[in-house]
Image (cartoon, grey):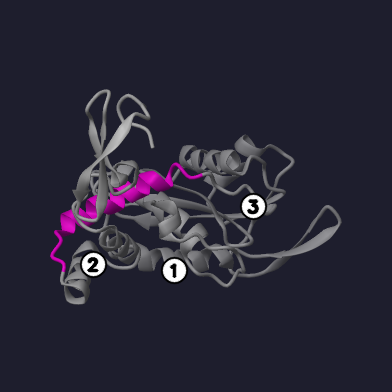
Amino acid sequence: MNCLTCNSTNIKKDGKYKFYQKYKCKNCHRQFSERSFSFFHRHRFPQEIIKFCILQMMFISTRMTKFTLSETFQFNVSHVSIYNWNKKFAQELSKLQRSKGFSNIWHVDEKFVRVNGSKDKFAYLWVVIDDRNNIIAVNVSESRDTKSAIKVLSIAKKSAEKPPDIIVTDGLQAYIKACRHVFGRKTKHKVRHFETKATMNKGRIYYLSNNRIESLNSKINLWYKKFRGFKRLDTANLWCKMWMYFYNLMRPRNIIKELVSIHQIIK
């Protein structure tokens, strides 16, 4: 173990704080503990309580999480503290290395969300997924135009590090120019709604519709309704990206894959 300030190995034990061993650097006299290197540094509540609150807020509001915590563990925590823990966790998730194993068929859709201060009555959440139900990119914008479509598709292309063979969208005209601008002519752009239609690509027949992402939108609605709208555009993007990582890495799904627990992300 090295000192947090001077990186020196010349340290000694300096008592305990609750259950955590404290240390003191003999060079710079800085005091620190085992917790100083973790996500829970400078939090007075036990780490299991913080993990519980973060996981609960993926499904329910901060005030309901506070009530559940009080009734289950007899801990009285402010709903503002729970909000701040989740915001810190969302920032930690953004540092994770994402898997690049996305398929060659992508689906794109946009949905209405409420953001205070947006130009229109609603803002727009853009979502890009592949045909294995992995979310590739999300972005919240104030407008529903070609520029916003280009932005989310560019984020998806950068995340996947390759363009798709086929991209499926609804009838929004902004997708036509956006797909051509971001992916060029090699990527086939197909407009589909609920009806399934056959498409030939590289000698294979694919039966495509946009039902897959419409089904995902219903799951997003269950998560989004607890917010009752977002306060700012930047926090809207932060929460949506947090849910994207939660959906891809932690949430149990029908697809067989190795799940990441909250304990592995915040140590």
Residue 168, by quadrant, is: bottom right
Judging by the rendered image, the residue that carries numbered circle 1 is: 218
Please name whichever residue, 238 or 41, is drawn nearer the observer in this view of the structure: 41
- Give residue 201's position: percent from left, percent from top: 80, 54
Residue 206, by quadrant, is: bottom right
| Secondary structure at numbered mark 1 | helix
Circle 2 Cα neighbour tier, 10 Å, few/some/many (<14 / 14–19 / ≥20)? many
Of marks 2 and 1, the one in the foreground = 2
Q: Is residue 244 left or right of residue 131?
A: left
Circle 1 Cα neighbour tier, 10 Å, few/some/many (<14 / 14–19 / ≥20)? few
Amino acid under disc 1 = Ser
Amino acid under disc 3 = Phe
Q: Is residue 155 located in the magenta-colored stretch of the structure?
A: no
- Give the position of the N terminus as an image quadrant: top left
Question: What's drawn in magenta, residue-wise?
Answer: 75-96
Amino acid under disc 2 = Thr
Relative to 142, does residue 202 appear above or below in the rendering? Answer: below
Judging by the rendered image, the residue that carries numbered circle 3 is: 102
